[in-house]
Image: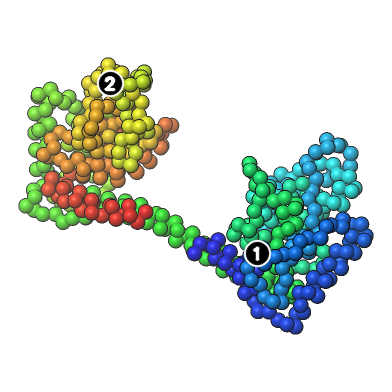
Amino acid sequence: MTPQELKSSILQLAIQGKLVEQRPEEGTVEELYKQIQAEKQALIRAGKTKKEKPLPEITENEIPFEIPESWKWVYIGDIFLHNTGKAQNASGSTSGTIRKFITTSNLYWGCFDFSKVKEMPFTEQEIERCSTRKGDLLVCEGGDCGRSAIWAYDEEVCIQNHVHRLRPYYELSIEYYYYMFYLYKFTGRLRGHGVAIQGLSSEAIHKVICPLPPLAEQKRIVAKIEELLPLIDRYEKAWSRLEDFNKRFPVDMQKSILQMAIQGKLVEQRPEEGTGEELYRQIQAEKQALVKAGKIKKEKPLPEISEAEIPFEIPESWKWVRFSNVVDVRDGTHDTPKYVASGIPLVTSKNLLDGKIDFETAKDISIEDATAINMRSHVDDGDILFAMIGTIGNPVLVKKDREFCIKNMALFKQIDASLLDMRYVLLFLQKAQTDMKAIANASVQSFVSLNLLRNYLFPLPPLAEQKRIVARLEELLPLCERLK
């Protein structure tokens, strides 16, 4: 149960007469109702309020829930003197006394925002009709219609025409009716009218049906509610922490599993599978053969890896390498070719989504421009794409079903499919992208350079262990997704 649901449940019990017991010695509601009506008639005779047409009888079909026999169903208009305020400078008149006035933008649930209180002139008659005094219940007509607060200040202010002022004809617990409006609002019993902005009209609020308990019971109900509200607040904080934990747990679990994988703690090491050093030599031999064949360019020797650079410990059978030691790291174009109606898709960082390429949002360029880009960065099946600018990361292992070219994108190409499992490289990049984003965000524009990617440290296990790590992750990561 959410905190809001719990609060609504408690208020529902309160408004139904189920939160505290009924006490016969507290008198009957009929006596209270007669006193209210007598005071109403006295105000009418004194000319302080207008005589209204009698409100219709409340029918059985209109009653939303049962209440105790000692209570009575009434209309808001039966028990409250009800006014709205003055339209903001509606007449354009400058005559009258300048007074502060409350609008719906100043009125929130249970409180007021006085940071932007406006002023305008009011005549003496308007001041009498539009002023609010201590103990009045103010209710929003428009916007978040029904939002309410009790005016608890000694200073009297005026109200705008979109604010309703409810003033009891006779003593009532105004807090009880504040909680009633809160419940009615959040359970949909206040139905605003209008299309663009829902509004609670004067007629509608006048005819809101509400329960009337004996006065002493109203006060006991409010005391019980206010005893329980701090407990609801404590529940809300605990519930929010739990919700936050539940949202973070799958992501944190996924990160932890990936971290264990790249640290060599997810599967056991097997001596018969060889070492990362042996695999590294094989990759280097194949790389030199490709350089001699002119299939890849010869690079400058990469710097030795120092102890200070190593981010974490790995098994003795593994080897720390730089990415360019074991994969061919390239990038796509950084220019923007002319787009055409139909041609070859140009994939950018915006098109990498949830481990896939979204070709629906990719724009096309001409075959000639695509050919020029692909001269240095042709994408093959089994390559990995990695966004370098803007949205950093989002690595994608390519399963190629069409020709395309890339922009602002790193391209990780396998040197030999039989020597390195690119699925393992992909999983490493999924973990490493967090650190790369932190590096990228430190610059003016989010950006990771090709040089950074080529020199980035990569833990190299034996090939068979790579495959076992991937197999284990493919079992565990879907469970994290299900937790989300």
For label 1, the residue is 61
- Density class for disc 2 (Cα within 10 Å; few <14, some 14-19, many ≥20) is many
Q: Label 2 amino acid? A: Ala
* Mark found first going from the N terminus, 2 or 1: 1
Q: Residue furthest left?
A: 272
* Front one among 481 and 75: 75
What is the three-letter code of the residue carrying label 1?
Asn
**Residue 260 picture location, percent across and down:** 25, 53
Q: Is residue 214 left or right of residue 281?
A: right
Quadrant holding the C terminus = bottom left
| Secondary element at image label 2 | helix
Q: Is residue 113 visible?
A: no
Residue appearing at x 76%, y 77% in the figure: 28
Tell me where residue 81 appears, x and y as whole percent.
81, 59
The structure's colour scheme is rainbow
For disc 1, the neighbor class at 10 Å (few under 14, some 14 to 19, many from 20) is few
Please name which of the two marks, 2 or 1, marks the residue nearer to the observer: 1
Give the residue number, with chain letter if any, for mark 2.
370
Badge 1 marks a residue whose secondary structure is helix
Does residue 339 sit above or below 257 in this rendering? above
Which quadrant of the structure image shows residue 34? bottom right
Which of the pair 465/137 is nearer the observer? 137
The CA span between labels 2 and 1 is 72 Å
User: Residue 388 appears at what percent x and percent y?
Assistant: 33, 33
